[in-house]
Image (spheres, grey):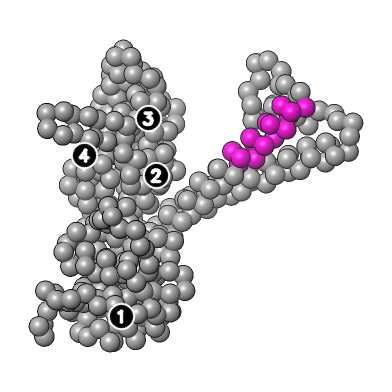
């Protein structure tokens, strides 16, 4: 047993880490709870024995990858586990940090855990910036909703043929006159909040452009190549690349589609096959931008405007894939519509295939890049 592996389960929280170890072919032991501090993790690693015999794991969560990077730096093989794919016993009713750590150690030893992709620190920094812009977009949507409901409550209906949230619409709101001071102050606060979030979104988009320009060449090339597709501009491409990393790590487009939760759920038994709505597992950020982009394919294939500018000087092979995608996905949209599918269902089905074209482009570009360390 001297050279046997030791499987370590860590239940990581902001202040504490519960630790359990499963000996290869032996018992699962609780090692207690330590502080979530670098010095405490170092002491734990020293107690566990030779680093080449240790296989550690913990659940992905709000604590990020700090513990992962520290263990890897110490020479310990560590995996970050997808929480939703951890096996659970139906009758299990007691949950504690120590039990969770023991379960991780036991399942890791049995090979029943699914690890997630861990970005490097530069990749994670760009991803955080892209997610911050997404949060700002949500804040702007909420601010606009609050203003819209305020106007509705006080009978302020917009003029006909005026589109909401355009400059003309905002100018019309400023002309509204209220007699009560409270309403005047409320409207002014709503307008200031919308102006603030608009400037915030604009500022973050500029910072994303700067961050992409400073990103590794490999990342820049894939972001640029994905823009050969209709409906996939820089921010959408950046979201896909920062959330998924190297798309070539997926063996097939079907695997990528399943990872993003865009495949139908299934509950089949015997000769009965039951398929339902999409699984919605995996990365919700990618799923959202893919579905948004898919709405473009309800229109006939076309090359011009921003798409033509993005494709200027691009590899003809990538442009050919983008053009093939337009024809394929437009026909798919028309076919599903004629079958009576509603628009959301149709767009999700188109988005699933759009993800396949993204895989094709990204894989083509990444295979041409020099090999790099994982």
Observer-side mark, 3 or 2, equals 2
For the point 42% across and 33% down, the residue is 292
Residue 146 painted magenta: yes
Whole-number angstrom distance, CA of label 1 to CA of label 3: 50 Å
Q: Main secondary structure of the magenta part?
A: helix
Residue beneath disc 4: 254
Locate residue 216, reporting x and y percent.
35, 58
For numbered disc 4, what is the local secondary structure? helix
| Residue 303 in view here | no
Residue bearing mark 1: 31
Choose the circle earlier in sequence order: 2 or 4: 4
Mark 2 burial class by Cα count in 10 Å: few <14, some 14-19, many 20+: some
The residue under label 2 is 284
User: Of 135 and 18, which appears nearest the observer?
Assistant: 18
Looking at marks 3 and 4 on the same chain, the residue that comes earlier in the sequence is marked by 4
Q: Which residues are magenta?
A: 140-154
**Mark 4 surroundings within 10 Å by alpha-carbon count, few (fewer than 14), some (14 through 19), many (20 or more):** some
Q: Which mark is residue 294?
A: 3
Residue at position x 26%, y 40% in the image: 257
Does residue 328 appear in the picture of this structure?
A: yes
Dot 2 falls on a residue whose secondary structure is helix
């Amino acid at each position: 047993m001297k050279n046997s592996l030791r499987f370590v389960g860590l239940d990581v929280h902001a202040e504490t880490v519960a630790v359990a170890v499963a000996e290869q072919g032996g018992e699962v032991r609780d090692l207690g709870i330590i502080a979530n501090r670098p010095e405490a993790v170092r002491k734990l690693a020293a107690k566990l024995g030779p680093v080449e015999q240790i296989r550690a794991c913990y659940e992905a969560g709000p604590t990020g990858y700090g513990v992962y990077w520290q263990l890897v730096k110490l020479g310990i093989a560590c995996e970050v586990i997808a929480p939703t794919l951890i096996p659970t016993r139906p009758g299990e009713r007691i949950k504690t940090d120590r039990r969770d750590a023991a379960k991780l150690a036991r399942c890791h030893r049995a090979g029943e855990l699914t690890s997630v992709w861990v970005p490097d620190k530069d990749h994670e920094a760009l991803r955080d910036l892209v997610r911050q812009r997404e949060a700002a977009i949500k804040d702007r949507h909420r601010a606009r909703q609050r203003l819209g409901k305020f106007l509705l409550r006080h009978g302020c209906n917009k003029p006909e043929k005026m589109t909401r949230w355009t400059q003309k619409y905002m100018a019309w709101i400023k002309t509204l006159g209220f007699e009560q001071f409270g309403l005047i102050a409320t409207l002014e606060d709503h307008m200031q909040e919308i102006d603030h979030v608009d400037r915030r979104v604009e500022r973050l988009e500029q910072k994303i452009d700067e961050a992409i320009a400073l990103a590794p060449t490999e990342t820049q090339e894939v972001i640029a190549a994905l823009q050969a597709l209709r409906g996939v501009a820089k921010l959408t491409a950046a979201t896909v690349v920062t959330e998924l990393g190297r798309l070539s790590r997926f063996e097939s487009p079907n695997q990528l589609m399943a990872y993003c939760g865009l495949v139908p759920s299934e509950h089949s038994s015997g000769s009965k096959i039951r398929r339902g709505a999409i699984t919605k597992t995996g990365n919700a950020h990618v799923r959202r931008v893919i579905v948004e982009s898919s709405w473009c394919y309800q229109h006939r294939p076309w090359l011009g405007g921003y798409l033509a500018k993005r494709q200027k000087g691009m590899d003809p092979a990538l442009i050919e894939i983008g053009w093939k995608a337009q024809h394929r996905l437009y026909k798919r949209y028309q076919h599903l519509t004629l079958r009576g599918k509603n628009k959301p269902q149709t767009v999700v089905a188109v988005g699933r295939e759009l993800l396949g074209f993204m895989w094709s482009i990204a894989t083509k570009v990444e295979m041409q890049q020099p090999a790099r360390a994982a």
